[in-house]
Amino acid sequence: NPSKPKTMKNKIAVIITIAVVLLAILGACGGKNYAPRPKGYFRIDFPEKTYKQYNGECPFKFEIPEYSFLIKEKEDNCWFDIYFPSYKATVYLTYRFVNNDIDTLLNDAHDFAYKHTIKADAIEENIFEKDSSRVFGCLYNIKGNVASQVQFYLTDSTTHFMRGSLYFEAHPNKDSLAPVVDFIRDDIEHFMESFEWR
């Protein structure tokens, strides 16, 4: 039958044409102008910043946000957690009485912050001084996918020492946590500025 070879040739021509068109479309997608859509995160609405005073039996006083809770670790010490339930975040506060070991306490605070060096993109140290109240310290801003992005210490350099660190109940992700870290970092700075020894 003389029509069969023509039909076969037509089918092959159609297949080749479709393949060429598909290759052209795929080639256009691989150009330099193609960029994948960035991963999005939920918008977070933050409350207005208002603060309340802690002035208990421990040898210091400070202010924490109204949207946080202060939890005392044990009755016989002055260790506290500042818990932010809306963000599943906690600032752990450890108080120590200085007993001729201020250098050890300062080195420990520095070492705790720099344990994150392996995963950190950078670590910024911001020195804090409030001479009128003899409150001196340092705020560590730790950039990157690290377990604790903000750490700090406060001391009067002779008698009292307080160390704090921020942790989330979530896997570290600097992009999704960044707005919350910035928001709570402001509260930590307020904590440091309002802090006084008694």
Image (spheres, rainbow, N blue to C red):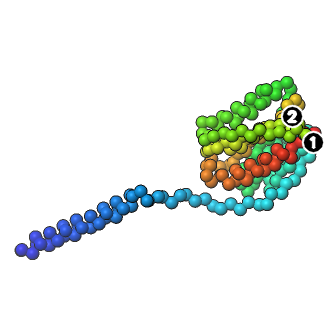
Closer to us: 80 or 21: 21
Other-residue count near label 2 (Cα within 10 Å), few / some / many at <14 / 14–19 / ≥20 = many
Other-residue count near label 1 (Cα within 10 Å), few / some / many at <14 / 14–19 / ≥20 = few
Q: Residue at x 68, y 44 (%)?
A: 149
Q: Residue 163 carries which label?
A: none
Image coords of residue 166 (percent x, y): 73, 45
Q: Residue at x 70, y 34 (%)?
A: 112
Closer to us: 31 or 101: 31
Q: Earlier in the sequence, mark 1 or mark 2?
A: 1
Which residue ends up furthest to the left in the rendered image?
1
Q: Is residue 122 above or below residue 89?
A: above
Image coords of residue 101 (percent x, y): 82, 25
Q: Which residue is drawn at 72% across and 38% down?
A: 125
Closer to us: 110 or 148: 110
Identify residue for label 1: 57
Q: Quadrant of the N terminus?
A: bottom left
Give the alpha-carbon distance from disc 1 to disc 2, as whole Å: 18 Å
Image coords of residue 44 (percent x, y): 68, 60
Q: Residue at x 93, y 39 (%)?
A: 198
Image coords of residue 136 (percent x, y): 83, 37
Question: Looking at the picture, which amino acid does disc 1 mark?
Answer: Glu
Identify residue for label 2: 156
- Can residue 148 be spotted in the picture? no
Q: Is residue 6 above or below residue 46?
A: below
Question: Looking at the picture, which amino acid does disc 2 mark?
Answer: Asp
